[in-house]
Image: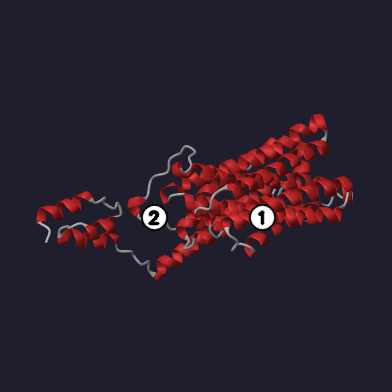
Amino acid sequence: MPSPQSQQTSLTSQPVDVHPLSAVAGMPAPACWEKQHHIDHLPMMPTQREQQARRRSYVVVACTMTMVMAGSTILTPLYASYRKTFGFSALTLTVNGVAVGALAGAGSAALLELGKQAKTSALVTTAAISGGGMVGIVLSGVLAQYAPFPLLLCYVVYLVLMLFVLSGVFTMVEPLPPGHRRPFHPHRPRWPARQTIPFLLGTAVGAVAYCANALFLSVLPSFFTVQLQTTNITLVATPVALFFLSLTMTQIVLHQLAAQRAAVIGLLLEAIGLGLMLYATALGSVPLLLVAILVGGAGVGLATLGSLSLVSPLIAPQERGDVFGTYYALLFLCLGVAAVAVGVLANPLGLIVAVRWITSIIMVLCLTTVGALLLRPPGPASGTA
């Protein structure tokens, strides 16, 4: 039988598990300490009222993200009119997207903390952002064409809806216990320190998708205005709404795809959709462009869902707000760069040549990112989307 001294040596020579419950199980401790530790770490079952409050807050966050994204696209059908009147540039439209990037990070973190499953929260986040884009375009296009005060009424309706959503924000519950809450203060951009390469790769998938998004939104209204020879704002906005509809429905129907597979398929569909868009605009074919819209929208939808599902498992709970903020800032920065690049190159090269150059570059980025994903060894972020 080993001596007490040898027992003490064997205990101290073994590595101590940093998990508190493991430490309690493997090391002697006073009974009062162990009892208190057990009580402190006992999972607290929320009451029925608390569960209802969390579900209500979850819905409020999703609706808020939808409405803020709608505000970023409400200008799209009216952009031609504002450009003639005020001389707005693509850069001005891009700076209207700052609010979307600021809310997207906080909203994604809130949905993860309020929800039960990360997979569902990723789907709700991407669907809220893409669905909001469709809501803004339809709202603006219909009211501007068929209602009085075409350049004003859509904003009045939007502000009323935003006030309704804002009233819900004030009733939200805080998912973190009081001891873990921190006062708000600005944070520097950051990403997971130990998962830098996987994080940047997952972010690259979303960034390329947002670049393709910018190309479709830049080309579709102008092409349909010329081909259909119409000034009907609703008709011109319809293909953009169809793009967002394809994007959102693809996310809902195929959300069970593994994250890496969704990203790869999405990027390939993006490249095909962009190629079809170039071919359709060269031929002047509206039916072929409609096919490009459906394919490209599906690709952007899968790629953005796969990107978020690749990134989410890499982020620690205490870093969610900061890292998601960085994630969406990079995505919207790429969207803005693609949109502004078309406008900058259009002056010396012409719009058609500028679109061809930028589209070709994004297609190459799609295929390059697919290669990087296929070469990446499987990891925890490659699970289901």
The N terminus - image quarter: bottom left
Q: Is residue 20 left or right of residue 257?
A: left
Residue 263 spot, x, y in % from top left: 62, 53
Q: Is residue 306 left or right of residue 186?
A: right
Q: Pointer 2: residues within 10 angstroms few (<14), some, or many (20+)?
A: few
> What residue lies at 24% left-to-right and 60% top-to-bottom?
25
Point out which mark residue 217 bears. none
Badge 1 amino acid:
Ile
> What residue lies at 68% left-to-right and 35% top-to-bottom?
91
> What residue lies at 65% left-to-right and 57% top-to-bottom?
131
**Quadrant of res 94:** top right
The C terminus - image quarter: bottom right
> What residue lies at 80% left-to-right and 29% top-to-bottom?
348
Residue that label 1 marks: 265
Per the image, label 1 sits on a secondary structure element best described as helix
Residue 108 spot, x, y in % from top left: 52, 52
Q: Is residue 22 visible?
A: yes
Residue that label 2 marks: 176
Q: CA distance from mark 1 to mark 2?
A: 37 Å
Badge 2 amino acid:
Leu
Q: Is residue 119 left or right of residue 207?
A: left
Q: Is residue 302 left or right of residue 348?
A: left
**Quadrant of res 43:** bottom left
| Depicted 56 relative to depicted 140: above or below | below
Q: Pointer 1: residues within 10 angstroms few (<14), some, or many (20+)?
A: some
Q: Nearer the viewer, mark 1 or mark 2?
A: 1
Per the image, label 2 sits on a secondary structure element best described as loop
Instruction: Please state which of residues 8 and 348 is positioned toward the viewer in this rendering.
Output: 8
| Depicted 322 relative to depicted 111: above or below | above
Instruction: Please state which of residues 99 and 302 is positioned toward the viewer in this rendering.
Output: 302
